[in-house]
Image (cartoon, rainbow, N blue to C red):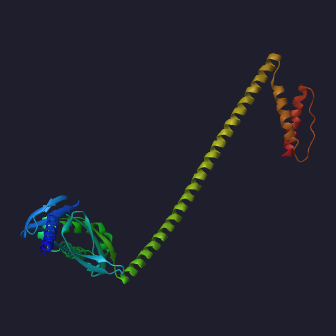
Amino acid sequence: MLLTLGIVMFVFIAFAAFVFLLSSFFLVNQAEVIIIERLGKFDRILTPGLHLVTPFIERPRRVLWSYVTEGDNKRYNRVTRLFERLDLRESVYDFPRQNVITKDNVTMEINALLYYQITDPKAAVYEIDNLPQAIEQLTQTTLRDVVGSLTLDETLTSRAQINDRLRLILDEATDKWGVKVNRVELKEINPPADIRHAMEKEMRAERDRRAIILEAEGVKQSAILQAEGARESQVLRARGEADANILHAEGEAQARLKIATAEAQAIEMIKRTVPEGDPMPYMIAMRYINVLPEVMQGKDNKMIVIPYEASSLVGSLATVKKLFEETK
């Protein structure tokens, strides 16, 4: 009986010692911290690594964490948990859709995303109760205030400016909570159905107007290009005709110059052959022979007898003169 009681006591003491040792060691993972309180008062922060604490005197502070999650049915559910370990990594909070009113009294739904990070674990635990819910409420009120100062068109076209304003305001407000707001993004902006229909009609009309303007500009440019092409074509044609006339005149001048040169050389040759003779009768006879075919093309086709001897050329010239007078 005593042996059995001794065994039971030994097992109980061993179990108590195991529980004591197990509750004395804490293994903290990377990017996590644990707040340790000593007799209900803040004592220290356990950083990543293995730590030894005094059981029943020192214990980790449990933190209430409440946040909203989106379910499978597109509905948001609020979840509340107790944590002993604070995550120091950057976290994202997807806020549920909320109704906001713009400056021109248009109600719309806006869904925002907030990226934040805990920089001071002690302030995040002791300066605010339920940090995620506090950030959610602060973001909603700030979003209503920012959007309320803008019109509908400004809200739809100034998303980046709204994100920057929200980030600056939230970062300044959550600084005493030991939280750094890194970024705020407007995920969705949904105007009412009638506003969306009106915007679609306006956008369609604007596109039609742009299409008509572009078509008119295309016709205008086409007409301008055709006119410029016709003008350049006429200019090039005139330049071509001018160049052709110049070349033709130059060719005739050169031909006449060569003919005159040839006649001068012929006269010189005649002078050298017959030093005492006169080359003029020879030149006149050659001219007469060249003109004769044109004279024969008259209506009456009169016959002219050319004397064989050059000395009788004067009589032939008289006949030619008479022929021209009768032709006229």
Q: Quadrant of residue 53?
A: bottom left
Q: Position of residue 249 (x, y in %)?
A: 67, 38
State the image coordinates of residue 254 (x, y, percent, origin top left).
69, 32
Residue at 36 percent across and 79 percent down: it is 72
Q: Residue at x 38, y 80 (%)?
A: 196
Figure label count:
0
Q: Nearest the camera: 228 or 148?
A: 148
Q: Is residue 230 above or below residue 267?
A: below
> Based on the displayed image, in which of its 4 quarters is residue 205 positioned?
bottom left
In this picture, residue 211 sits left or right of residue 111: right
Quadrant where the N terminus is found in the figure: bottom left
- Image quadrant of residue 47? bottom left
Q: Nearer the viewer, residue 196 or 276?
A: 196
**Which residue is found at the position 66% from the left and 42% from the top?**
245
- In the depicted view, which residue is nearer to us: 269 or 129? 129
Q: Is residue 148 left or right of residue 40?
A: right
| Percent of width and height locating residue 326 | 87, 44
